[in-house]
Image (spheres, rainbow, N blue to C red):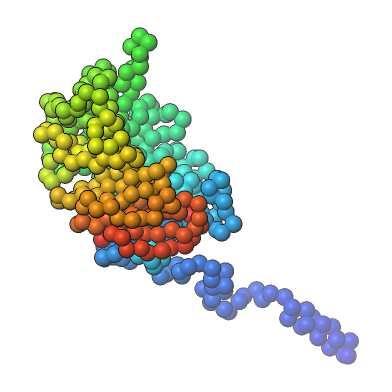
Amino acid sequence: MRRLIGILACFLALAACQKPLFDPTPRWMRMQDRFTHFPHAPEEETPDSLTLQLSSPGVFAVAVRFPEWADWREGDYRGAEAVLFKDSTELLSFPFRGDPAPDRICLLDGALWIDQTLEGRQTAVLRNGEMYLRYDGEEVLKGLLPLNGHLHTLGQRAGGKGLCYRIDGVAVFSSPVGNILGSREDREWPGGALAADSSGVYYSYSIPVQKGEETQHEYRIMRGAELVQTLAAGLAHTVFDIRPFNGVLYRSECRTPYSWSLCLVMADTPISMNVGEGESVSRCRLVPYEGEMVMKGYSTGLGGGKYTCWVRDHHGLRLTASSNNPVADLFMYQGSSAYITLDEGRVYQVFVGGVNTQAKPHTYLLKSARCAVFQKGTLAMALSHATGTEHRLWVNGKIIPLTFNGYFAAIQIQ
């Protein structure tokens, strides 16, 4: 009997050292320690609650943040995450699974949108950190536009394999060849290379055509899956932009190799932009402003400074920003304007209403065109430190400092 009791005691002691087959502790309590390093508990923010946050007044900025040990400036993107700030408060963070490029991030329609390539085989779109849609094939999205409850995307396929226009991830139109006109960096167009009119969603792409030893381009203008217009190769020397506005298709183009031939084409009627001799133009984009379509571009040799960013319409020059340094961008809102100059790629001068406002020159970068916005007379910039981790949001001279290892990708004022 004593031997049996001893064996039973040893068995009970051994069982006490083993993990029970059933742990009565609730799963959320068992998982809590594992996720205590997260800045927010997962249930604190949902896509719907974030939409409400993004519609309330404030300055919203998106950053790409890395662990302190990651040298992302040397290409170490491990541990990258997207972070959404409202003023200086962190609302949301979630990990990247692909290239954390600033042009793959945008604040649009009350949400934070990111597109990613997954293992080189799939394209995914995330909304507020949650998977919104995914599909097979690698595409870099040049256009992303939420519209009437549907998500329209325009993707450039990798390896020169053309493009694809999708609605909610389903291919509506594709071409095995062609380069999309426009990009997500087209700040004045929320959808990037996609532009919506009352008649539908438009986009354009070019196809190279070989004529003798010269390569020209044919342009195709699409409305959804429908080919609206074809511009024959050689009709214009350079087409900068094609957009719909109030039921009319507009183009920005140089008719010949010379800048003086720059025209705003309304339907099929060319309107000269009155570019003078000795002036060289570039990046001439179409912009809706005060109920009409205007053209915004850059020039050298215009006068008033070595570099000029301008706005032109059918009357000629409407607004200019000239400097001896490159002009990053010219902003306009209901008759008021602002512009930013650069020195060796870093923010140098900031002018609001013609007044030079100090922004600590030679220290900060604008990592994307969407890192600055001008609305209701307020200029806001998401400034990334060129070499360090002390970044700042700049709102009409007011500074909101934020320290992290990474950079800003976009800013928005509500």
89 lies left or right of 260: right
x and y percentages locating residue 198 in the rendered image: 15, 42
Give the residue at x 24% y 32%.
302
x and y percentages locating residue 115 in the rendered image: 41, 47
**Where on the picture, by quarter, is residue 266?**
top left
**Where on the picture, by quarter, is residue 57?**
bottom left
Give the residue at the far bottom of this rendering: 2
x and y percentages locating residue 280 in the rendered image: 28, 27
Location of residue 112 with respect to 401 vertically, above or below: above
Can residue 41 be seen here? yes
Location of residue 129 with respect to 296 vertically, above or below: below
Give the residue at x 43% y 63%.
402
Q: Nearer the viewer, residue 275 or 256?
A: 275
Give the residue at x 48% y 46%.
99
Give the residue at the far top of this rendering: 212
Give the residue at x 61% y 76%.
23
Q: Nearer the viewer, residue 403 or 132?
A: 403
